[in-house]
Image (spheres, rainbow, N blue to C red):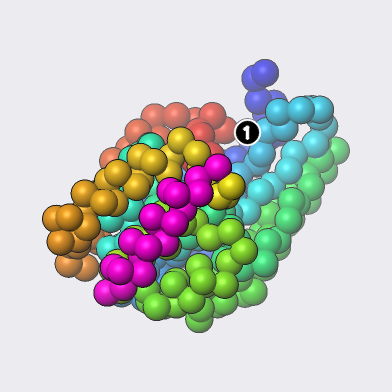
Amino acid sequence: MPRANWRKEIDQTLERELLAAGFEPFDGIAYSFPVSDEVLGVVQLFDQTLAKRANAERALLNTRIGIIHYRLGYIQSKLDRLTGRSLWRRTLGGAEGWIVPPIGYIDLVKAHSSETRLKIIQELIQTICTTKIPVVKHNFQNLDSIIRHLEQAVEPKESLFCSALVLAGQADRAKKRADDISADLETSHVHKLGWPVYKQHFDEWLAQGAPVPDLATAKAETMEAAAKRRAQMSEIPAHSRPTE
């Protein structure tokens, strides 16, 4: 179904207001903010299309906030190959479990004036800047903080966790965890098709001595991948871009 003009306006407003708030363009669907030398923050706002019970009079703004640890993300992009090219697959946050309490959906309706919709969007971005970004910056400065978060998660992103443990010098612990998951795959919460792909590459990586890039290399690769995807997304109208 073609997107109504009032919803196209929302997509354009989201882009404009995120830039006005100081976020940097990242991969064409998300915007970045600095966290530390090791970590980049990413935020995405999108007007979600309802697959079921679509309502032509209503739009839902969805917020996703995550982080990319440059070296861990680089490793993950090499090992977790079933996840495709989306840089969101390198992140902690969003689909991998919230790293800050979620904001929830924000309702916009066609009956709102353009001014009202703008005010709602600006207030949402202000909420993100004042209540969410400071928490991310405080809690996710380095690899150790990411590992602590994953250890406390009810269902951690296991491939990310195992890679993080190796990067932190805990290869034996990581290998045991990965082996235990593979031995009981049917009752594990991991992706049943994705995990064996990751595990094969993980074992090969360990056998090679678990080489990891330096920070400068990992950061450059991350930003190059983001720039390439951003160029691809620039050819697609804001309202037609994928959300991952």
Image quadrant assignment for residue 132: bottom right
| 178 left or right, relative to 6 | left
x and y, in percent, of residue 45 in the image: 59, 50
| 157 left or right, relative to 106 | left
| Res 137 seen here | no
Residue with the most extreme top position: 1
- Residue at the image point whose x is 85% and y is 38% from the top: 111
- Residue at the image point whose x is 50% and y is 81% from the top: 138
Stretch of the chain drawn in magenta: 169-186
| 137 left or right, relative to 84 | right
Name the residue beneath numbered marker 1: 8
Residue in front for this viewpoint, 60 or 161: 161
Q: Is residue 97 one of those drawn in magenta?
A: no
Provide the secondary structure element on which disc 1 rests.
helix
Residue with the most extreme front position: 183
Q: Is most of the magenta stretch helix, strand or loop?
A: helix
Residue in front for this viewpoint, 146 or 208: 208
Image quadrant assignment for residue 71: bottom left
Categorize mark 1 by other alpha carbons within 10 Å: few (<14), some (14-19), many (20+): some
- Residue at the image point whose x is 27% and y is 46% from the top: 201
